[in-house]
Amino acid sequence: MDQQKIGNFLKALRKEQNLTQEQLAEKLGVSSRTVSRWETGSNMPDISLLVALAELHGVSIAEIIDGERKSENMNNEVKETALKLSDYAQTINDTLKRRLLCLTVAAFIGMIAFAVIEMTGLDTPGSVYEKIASAGLGLGFGTLAVIILYLSGALTKIKARRLARRAAK
């Protein structure tokens, strides 16, 4: 952080509004000597005053800390990028939700098949019904495990580790 640059920026902002150091100090409830120290770069404004300074001068806190205005074009580009990332994340989320819904429906059907086969007594050893019942039960428990991993965030961690390993290669 370049205190000189920030000081010069604060001075320029004050002058843009045709304020003296005394007038600015009065608006912020500080001494004119404090404002002078900010502008020379020997001191920095207190964190609690950054919001008031930003609002007073019509800039962002980030611009004050950087000691320069950010172009409006850059701000729009950042906003557009953030919106695109948000749309991308929403698309991925929607896709994942559809897949989980399909998996849940398949598991539900499998569990119903298991229950019907068990209740009717068709699950004789070695029969095709026993295999269907086993598959339905396995699908149900497998889906339950995947949903638990997804909701707990463990799937995200597993995927991040996998990506990190690929990047390391």
Image (cartoon, helix red, strand yellow):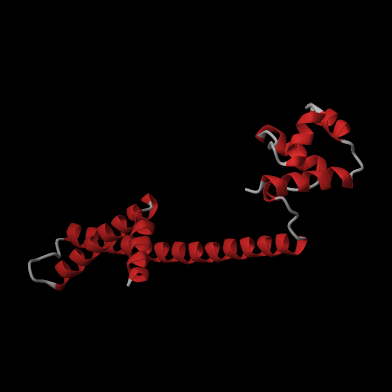
Q: What residue is rendered at 42% in x and 62% in y?
A: 101
Q: What residue is rendered at 87% in x and 31% in y?
A: 22
Count all numbered tags in the image, as a single digit.
Answer: 0
Q: Position of residue 11 (x, y in %)?
A: 81, 44
Q: Residue furthest right?
A: 18
Q: What residue is rendered at 65% in x and 48% in y?
A: 2
Q: Position of residue 28 (x, y in %)?
A: 79, 30
Residue 80 seen in this snapshot: yes
Q: What residue is rendered at 28% in x and 64% in y?
A: 110
Task: Classify residue 51 as left or right of residue 143.
Answer: right
Q: Residue furthest left?
A: 125
Q: Nearer the viewer, residue 141 or 125?
A: 141
Q: Position of residue 25 (x, y in %)?
A: 82, 30
Q: Where is 123 relative to 57, above or below? A: below
Task: Classify residue 68 as left or right of residue 162.
Answer: right
Q: Where is 14 relative to 120, above or below? A: above
Task: Classify residue 28 as left or right of residue 67.
Answer: right
Residue 64 seen in this snapshot: no
Picture quarter with the C terminus: bottom left
Q: Position of residue 116 (x, y in %)?
A: 23, 60
Q: Where is 126 relative to 153, above or below? A: below
Q: Nearer the viewer, residue 56 or 136?
A: 56
Q: Nearer the viewer, residue 166 or 147?
A: 166
